[in-house]
Image: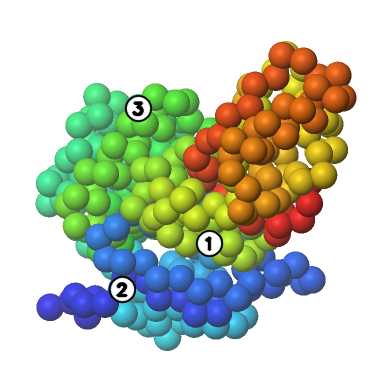
């Protein structure tokens, strides 16, 4: 029986890594439950790749500890490497080898064959098989990512670490890739995935929001929105730039951020009803000659929560 049969798939406590004066990962603690899709959500430079490289034994931490599948990422690295699958953010397969040759090469590295692992990679291989003779470098972005996922799965890992697997691919390929991850999760594989796309958070069982090397909050995606600490409103009008300035000039504004064709306004007060806030905002906007604006209360989403935690509750 595997040593990872019980307990969390990943446990990190106080994990840190510096590059010179920059704290790329700063005192990160997290737990990943076996069999879940756990997302690390954050912009470029947040520390996601550094965190993943430590968890897959490619980078030594400066401080803290991490265990993956019950094994220490420093002391047990050789045992651990046969049990994890890792897909780096940059396409790292051999572009001059064909799809079939790349897959056969990675299978050989782990002492197996493509035929022996056909059942493991079947959901992805069905889409790749028509291109088996094509050079990997000639594949589309979406197909390159599917080939990389296939190579990461070829040795039947117990856990997958996928670093920004959908960055740079089209919307249809992104959706197909996440559908594949759902299929793999349902087969019992634990998946830890990073992404800069907030809309992908909803495809995860739990997510951690990351910025400047720190985890801001960790929870189920819907729960993160429900925990938003202040009243939130969508404000729309013909002059968004004028609205932005006017709302940030309102005395009770906690934050105002552009969101597509609207502005998301957060009020600094907790105990005031939405009706009162809407009325006060409309009076304020009329007083600064802003017309045609609508104000309505809305439920907070992942992006709102991320912006709130990033701002650390500073006034707008």
Q: Is residue 112 above or below residue 30?
A: above
x and y, in percent, of residue 295 in the image: 63, 27
Q: Quadrant of residue 277?
A: top right
Quadrant of image for the N terminus: bottom left
At numbered mark 3, what does the secondary structure look like: helix, strand or loop? loop
Q: Relative to residue 43, is residue 153 drawn left or right? A: left
Front residue of 91/216: it is 216
Q: Relative to residue 19, is residue 12 drawn left or right? A: left
CA distance separating discs 2 and 3: 40 Å
Which label was assigned to residue 8?
2
Determine which residue is flagged by label 1: 217
Q: Are marks 1 and 3 in contact (CB under 8 Å)?
A: no
Front residue of 216/71: it is 216
Residue pictured at 80% horizontal, 30% vertical: 284
Q: Are marks 2 and 3 in contact (CB under 8 Å)?
A: no
At numbered mark 2, what does the secondary structure look like: helix, strand or loop? loop
Earlier-in-chain disc, 2 versus 3: 2
Q: Residues within 10 Å of mark 2 (few under 14, many from 20)?
A: some
CA distance separating discs 2 and 1: 19 Å
Determine which residue is flagged by label 3: 134
x and y, in percent, of residue 103 in the image: 29, 45
Q: Relative to residue 192, is residue 50 drawn left or right? A: right
Which label was assigned to residue 118?
none
In front: label 1 or label 3:
1
């Amino acid at each position: 029986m595997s040593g990872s049969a019980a307990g969390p798939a990943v446990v990190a406590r106080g994990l840190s890594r510096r590059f010179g004066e920059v704290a790329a990962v700063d005192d990160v603690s997290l737990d990943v439950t076996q069999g879940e899709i756990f997302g690390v959500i954050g912009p470029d430079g947040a520390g996601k790749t550094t965190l993943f490289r430590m968890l897959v034994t490619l980078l030594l931490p400066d401080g803290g500890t991490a265990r993956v599948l019950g094994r220490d990422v420093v002391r047990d690295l050789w045992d651990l490497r046969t049990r994890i699958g890792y897909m780096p953010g940059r396409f790292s397969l051999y572009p001059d080898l064909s799809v079939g040759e790349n897959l056969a090469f990675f299978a050989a590295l782990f002492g197996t064959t493509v035929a022996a692992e056909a059942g493991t990679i079947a959901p992805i291989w069905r889409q790749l098989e028509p291109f088996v003779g094509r050079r990997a470098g000639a594949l589309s972005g979406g197909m390159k990512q599917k080939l990389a996922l296939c190579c990461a799965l070829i040795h039947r890992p117990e856990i997958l670490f996928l670093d920004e697997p959908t960055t740079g691919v089209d919307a249809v390929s992104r959706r197909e890739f996440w559908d594949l991850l759902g299929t793999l999760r349902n087969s019992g594989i634990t998946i830890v995935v990073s992404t800069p796309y907030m809309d992908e958070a909803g495809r995860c069982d739990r997510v951690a929001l990351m910025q400047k090397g720190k985890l801001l909050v960790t929870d189920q995606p819907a729960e993160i929105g429900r925990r938003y600490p202040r009243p939130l409103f969508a404000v729309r009008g013909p002059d968004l730039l004028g609205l932005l300035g006017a709302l940030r000039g309102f005395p009770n504004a906690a934050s105002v951020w552009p969101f597509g064709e609207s502005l998301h306004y957060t009020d600094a007060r907790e105990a005031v009803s939405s009706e009162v806030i809407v009325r006060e905002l409309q009076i304020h906007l009329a007083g600064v000659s802003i017309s045609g604006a609508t104000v309505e209360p809305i439920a907070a989403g992942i992006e709102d929560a991320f912006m709130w935690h990033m701002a650390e509750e500073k006034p707008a």
